[in-house]
Image: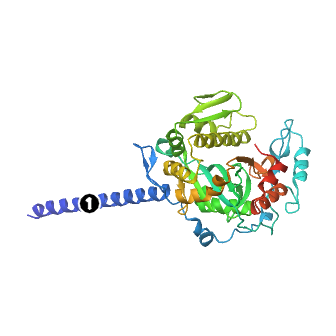
């Protein structure tokens, strides 16, 4: 009799256990999906090869100060200084023969300036640029290395693979692009000295913006980010882009020949990411990235996108879904920012790179790029006072 009663009782217990396990699994899956959506910030539609809408970045720019506070003045005296190298020197200031590299010490001394007395590219403790809102507009353009699909399991986190500042002066006389090499050694607010592209991984868009503001002493008005899949789809959406290739090189399955070359999304992504085929690595990569941007710019111009504000807004609306932007940067706002350029008739794109003293090695063995703070101070002034034409006349442009 007791056995007859215990059998249904045991079944009920097993049913309860199975239901409990299923409930836990459902909760875990729900939390996982929720985290993924929170992390991605957008939905990719594989049928249209397009993001479903313009979405907010991780945190709105208006919340940067609220969440991070003012950019912190970091105590760099607690860090070991990096060493600077040149083409004749290697890690820790030694040359190919292993001899003590006096060239490295000379490079550091040559890079020293009023607020970077040891020449390591990091501002001296207790000094930082004031973040100034100048008369022009500053838009931070990011290409992140976030992967999707099968690649997402192989590469964790998200770093800024490409960092550019677009500056539009108040008078609308052209557009100025400043490339910031991803290995540039900077102070990341709250974290200390690190490569500038690590800020995106440490604290999302907000920290990346705060880091660039801290480096250049300017207020970033807006930010736009595009990831690998979005980049390829954007290029394909305009029918591909004609890019001026500087010389022959191969990367993986792609072969590039000197001269004008038509690129689809896959080829364009390989072109802007390539660095290992080049003796000067990232230096050539940022030049290639600017060559692609010039090609994209010319493509849009040929399609009539720069003829007037209305046509420009329509063009922006057609490609806006492929990237993430801050909540205040819709197509109408972009057209408003570009209006001075379009109406002035000077739609020239002028490009340069953040001044640096060459490659070096961090105290923990990372290959880095050392900022030239004396020239960077002049860049900061030019951005603050809409005098980029004078800066480029002195330091050159591409």
Tell me the quarter of the image containing the C terminus.
top right
Residue 302: image location, x then y, percent:
59, 40
In the image as oriented, which residue stretches furthest toward the left?
1
| Horizontal side of residue 356 vs 152, given as left or right | right
Q: Quadrant of residue 25?
A: bottom left
Residue 157: in sight, yes or no? Answer: no
Left or right, 27 with respect to 330, comes to left
Q: How is the image coloured?
A: rainbow
Q: Nearer the viewer, residue 203 or 348?
A: 348
Residue 85 position within the rendered picture, expressed as x and y whole percent measured from the top left: 83, 45
Q: Residues within 10 Å of mark 1 (few under 14, many from 20)?
A: few
Q: Is residue 148 above or below residue 18?
A: above
Q: Assign a secondary structure to mark 1.
A: helix
Q: Is residue 201 above or below residue 263?
A: below
Question: In front: 373, or 232?
Answer: 232
Count of picture labels:
1
Q: In x, y percent, where is residue 216?
A: 74, 60
| 171 vs 3, nearest the viewer | 171
Q: Residue at x 56, y 60 (%)?
A: 333
Identify the residue shown where x is 84% and y is 36%.
96
Res. 396 visible in picture: yes
Quarter of the figure with the N terminus: bottom left
State the residue position of label 1.
Answer: 19
Residue 395 appears at what percent x and percent y? 83, 49
Residue 65 location, quadrant: bottom right
């Amino acid at each position: 009799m007791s056995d007859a009663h215990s059998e249904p009782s045991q079944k009920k217990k097993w049913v309860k256990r199975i239901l409990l396990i299923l409930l836990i699994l459902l909760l875990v899956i729900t939390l996982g999906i929720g985290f993924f959506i929170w992390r991605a910030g957008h939905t990719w539609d594989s049928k249209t090869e397009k993001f479903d809408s313009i979405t907010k970045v991780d945190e709105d720019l208006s919340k940067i100060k609220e969440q991070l506070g003012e950019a912190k003045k970091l105590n760099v005296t607690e860090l070991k200084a990096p060493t600077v190298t040149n083409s004749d020197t290697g890690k820790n200031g030694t040359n190919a023969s292993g001899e003590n590299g006096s060239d490295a010490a000379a490079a550091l001394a040559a890079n020293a300036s009023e607020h970077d007395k040891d020449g390591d590219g990091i501002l001296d403790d207790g000094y930082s640029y004031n973040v100034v809102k100048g008369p022009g507009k500053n838009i931070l353009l990011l290409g992140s290395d976030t992967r999707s699909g099968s690649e997402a399991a192989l590469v964790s986190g998200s770093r800024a693979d490409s960092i550019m500042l677009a500056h539009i002066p108040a008078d609308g006389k052209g557009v100025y692009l400043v490339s910031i090499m991803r290995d540039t050694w900077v102070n990341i607010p709250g974290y200390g000295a690190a490569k500038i592209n690590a800020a995106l991984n440490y604290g999302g868009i907000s920290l990346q913006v705060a880091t660039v503001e801290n480096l250049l002493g300017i207020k970033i008005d807006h930010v736009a980010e595009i990831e690998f899949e979005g980049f390829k789809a954007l290029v394909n959406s305009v029918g591909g882009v004609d890019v001026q290739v500087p010389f022959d090189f191969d990367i993986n399955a792609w072969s590039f020949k000197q001269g004008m070359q038509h690129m689809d999304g896959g080829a364009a992504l390989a072109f802007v990411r390539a660095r290992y085929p080049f003796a000067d690595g990232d230096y050539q990569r940022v030049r290639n990235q600017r060559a692609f941007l010039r090609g994209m710019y010319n493509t849009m111009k040929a399609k009539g996108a720069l003829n007037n504000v209305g046509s420009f807004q329509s063009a922006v609306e057609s490609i806006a879904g492929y990237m993430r932007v801050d909540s205040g940067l819709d197509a109408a706002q972009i057209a408003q920012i570009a209006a001075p350029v379009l109406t002035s008739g000077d739609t020239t794109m002028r490009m340069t790179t953040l001044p640096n003293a060459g490659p070096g090695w961090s105290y923990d063995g990372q290959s880095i790029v050392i900022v030239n703070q004396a020239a960077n101070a002049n860049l900061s002034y030019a951005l603050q006072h809409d005098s980029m034409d004078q800066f480029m006349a002195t330091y050159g442009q591409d």
